[in-house]
């Protein structure tokens, strides 16, 4: 029996560089691989029991919101970008990143299982499904992800992904970093630091892919994409400020969280090749210190939690990602 081939099916070839940066991102993603089971969250139980009810409620909700975002990024965001990415090495890196998003989502459940009762967990996930600003955030993101059909919409989906990973997560990261910087909930803070490290890498890589697509368009098309990209940016930030004011209400931290959001929104735009949008005077020093892995008592590029050694790797610097597109 003879078959007529409809098309040539290619296998990914890692023996040569396709673009000068994807293999480096693959290697760094693999070096950073971790699992929530490697972190002993039970060390936080004593401190958790000493927190006030309001502190516990805020902590639960910020992690609940992060769980929803990671779920949508792993289930919808990364697949939408992979669907129109032809380069097989790039597909592999995106796939790995999608797996890590699922691991991030599971890591929050590991914290919940350790600290909360089954009833509290059920109530939290009910809150996730009914909180309007959180649901609207998911709607805004999915509106773009679910309409990725051509190169223009692929660029906008990648920009949305960079916004998600480089600033939307940070309203949720703020409080765990804030507590960990004061020596509270340190084990859970280690998980947040591992997630932060991953998201930084994701934002930079997808930002590079987005810049490459953007630069392939005419000036007229670029202007059109700019308008749409900044519209997505504005809508997400407006909703994120509403969300922040809601969950941080009466903590006295609202303005500091919003400043932190704006600081990281500028970093998101930098990942896409654009200038800062906001002027941010001052960021909470405890939280800002938490963004930098080298300030921890151990190096997350060689250690996962307490005593878990994987190997010694050089820490990536910003200049490692300066790549001509």
Image (cartoon, rainbow, N blue to C red):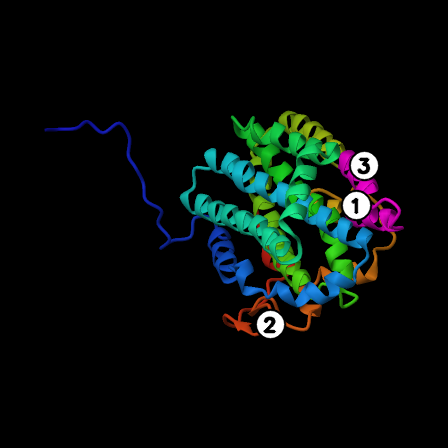
Label 2, label 3: how many angstroms apart (C-alpha)? 37 Å
Q: Position of residue 84 (x, y in %)?
A: 47, 33
For mark 1, does the 10 Å Cα neighbourhood hold few (<14), some (14 to 19), or many (20 or more) residues? Answer: many
Does label 1 or label 2 sit earlier along the sequence? 1
Lower sequence index among marks 3 and 1: 3
Which numbered circle lies on residue 306? 2
Q: Mark 3 or mark 2, which is nearer the start of the sequence? A: 3
Alpha carbon of mark 1 to alpha carbon of mark 2: how far?
Answer: 32 Å
Residue marked by disc 1: 262
Q: Is residue 192 magenta?
A: no
x 74%, y 59%: residue: 177
The image quadrant that residue 130 belongs to is: top right
Magenta stretch: includes residue 260: yes
Please state if 45 lies on the left or on the right of 2 as rendered: right
Q: Which residue is rendered at x = 62% and y = 52% of the image?
A: 108
Tell me the element at label 1. helix
Image depth: mark 1 or mark 2 in front: 2
Q: Which numbered disc, 3 or 1, marks the residue closer to the eye?
A: 3
Q: CA distance from mark 3 to mark 1?
A: 14 Å
Viewer-side residue, 220 vs 160: 160
| Quadrant in which the N terminus is drawn | top left
Relative horizontal placement of residue 83, taking residue 155 as reference (left or right): left
Tell me where the magenta segment starts and ends, as one range: 237-261
Dot 3 lies on which element? helix
Q: Residue 242 shows which numbered tag?
A: 3
Q: Look at the numbered disc 2 and give the secondary structure of its residue.
A: loop
Label 2 environment density (alpha carbons within 10 Å; few <14, some 14–19, many ≥20): few
Q: Residue at x 65, y 68 (%)?
A: 43
Residue 69, position as x, y percentages in the image: 63, 41
Q: Nearer the viewer, residue 168 or 16?
A: 168
């Amino acid at each position: 029996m003879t078959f007529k081939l409809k098309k040539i099916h290619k296998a990914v070839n890692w023996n040569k560089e396709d673009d000068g940066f994807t293999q480096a991102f693959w290697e760094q993603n693999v070096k950073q691989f971790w699992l929530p089971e490697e972190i002993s969250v039970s060390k936080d139980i004593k401190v958790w029991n000493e927190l006030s009810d309001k502190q516990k409620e805020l902590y639960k909700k910020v992690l609940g919101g992060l769980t929803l975002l990671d779920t949508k990024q792993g289930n919808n965001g990364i697949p939408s970008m992979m669907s129109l990415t032809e380069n097989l090495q790039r597909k592999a890196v995106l796939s790995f990143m999608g797996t890590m998003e699922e691991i991030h989502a599971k890591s929050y459940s590991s914290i919940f299982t350790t600290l909360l009762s089954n009833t509290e967990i059920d109530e939290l996930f009910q809150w996730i499904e009914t909180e309007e600003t959180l649901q609207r955030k998911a709607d805004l993101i999915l509106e773009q992800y679910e309409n990725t059909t051509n190169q223009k919409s692929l660029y906008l989906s990648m920009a949305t992904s960079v916004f998600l990973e480089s600033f939307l997560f940070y309203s949720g990261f703020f409080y765990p970093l804030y507590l960990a910087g004061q020596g509270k909930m340190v084990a859970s803070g280690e998980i947040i630091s591992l997630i932060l490290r991953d998201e930084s890498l994701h934002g930079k890589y997808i930002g590079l892919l987005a810049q490459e697509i953007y630069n392939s368009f005419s000036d007229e098309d670029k202007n059109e994409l700019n308008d749409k990209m900044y519209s997505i940016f504005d809508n997400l930030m407006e909703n994120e400020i509403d969300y922040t004011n809601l969950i941080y209400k009466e903590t006295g931290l609202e303005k500091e969280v919003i400043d932190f959001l704006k600081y990281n929104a500028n970093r998101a735009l930098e990942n896409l090749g654009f200038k800062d949008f906001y002027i941010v005077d001052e960021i909470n020093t405890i939280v800002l210190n938490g963004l930098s892995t080298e300030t921890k008592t151990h190096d997350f590029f060689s250690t996962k939690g307490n005593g878990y050694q994987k190997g010694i790797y050089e820490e990536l610097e910003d200049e490692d990602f300066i790549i001509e597109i």
